[in-house]
Amino acid sequence: MRLNLAARQPFSFSSVVGSHGWQRLAPFEREAQQDSLTYVDRLTSGRVVKLIMKEAPGGISIEVEGVSQPEERGEITRKVTWMLGLQQDFSAFYALARTEPKLAQVEKRAQGRILRCPTLFEDLIKTILTTNTTWTGTIRMVAGLVDQFGDPLPAEPHRRAFPTPEQLGATDEATLRSETRLGYRAPYVLEIARAVAGGSLDLEAFKSKEFPTGQLHKQLLAIKGVGRYAAANLLMILGRYDHLPVDSWAFKMISQEWYGGAAIGEAEIQAVFQGWGEWKGLAYWFWDWPTEY
């Protein structure tokens, strides 16, 4: 089956895929030779399928085998529309970016969309697994979760879907620590999975625009394992850009770019991007940073 989905213009599939490192985390897989991004998904029906996403005139095409039911087609359409931000509007951001040489490339490259997972649960777990570790460590931990707990793709059993909250919630902390090697993150992952599975934490509701950003920020920070960086990162994924996902890299780059390499704090970082208002996160994310200082 092939689906063709339209995207609000301007749109660049490669810009979305390359917006951050999620493309390298299972069950995503970038196939550069085919100019495609694949994702192994477990549908609500329980069927595990591989979505093959490519750029197409006016948007994208999705190839998937074994899907014929209208409900499954509709589910795939909703998920991919969210994952690639197909209907997001960045015209106001582009208007501001035209005044800043360091952001001169964003409109031409159709930057702004950030690759997302189909569920906020998956984005949340992956974000927690980026904290206090190397990128190699994140890749390993995510792969461990998928390989140990995810359902296999029938045609390619070495590839698996991201585990459901129920699948992760059924394990225990010792397994996540020793076998999956999540370290101190194990109890956080387990508690979140059980809360989502049990219905006491409705992460999908966070996608609603009815939540003011300030309220959403507080709710994210109330989740064990989510600090200020993780909360800001998740807000970016949710399309809220008025918080900065500040990590050690940000301190280094902003210090060199604006403060001559001097030691700086959070206040100095916030001051640099304050004028960007609701778009400050995107201005920081897509700034034309030097390759190295």
Image: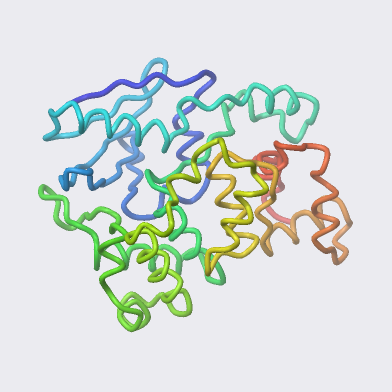
Location of residue 201 in the rendering, given as x and y in whole percent from the top left corner: 43, 57
Tell me the residue at 46%/44% (across/down): 205
Location of residue 132 in the rendering, given as x and y in whole percent from the top left corner: 56, 71
Location of residue 64 in the rendering, given as x and y in whole percent from the top left corner: 20, 33
Location of residue 16 in the rendering, given as x and y in whole percent from the top left corner: 49, 36
Toward the top, the furthest residue is 57
Q: Nearer the viewer, residue 48 or 63?
A: 48
Q: Is residue 209 above or below residue 29?
A: above
Left or right of 56 in this view: 22: right
Q: Nearer the viewer, residue 182 or 192?
A: 192
Quadrant of the rendered structure where residue 181 is?
bottom left
Toward the front, the furthest residue is 200
Tell me the residue at 30%/41% (across/down): 38
Left or right of 3 in this view: 291: right
Tell me the residue at 79%/31% (across/down): 100
Q: Looking at the rendering, in which quadrant would you find the C terminus?
A: bottom right
Quadrant of the rendered structure where residue 91 is?
top right
Tell me the residue at 27%/62% (across/down): 166
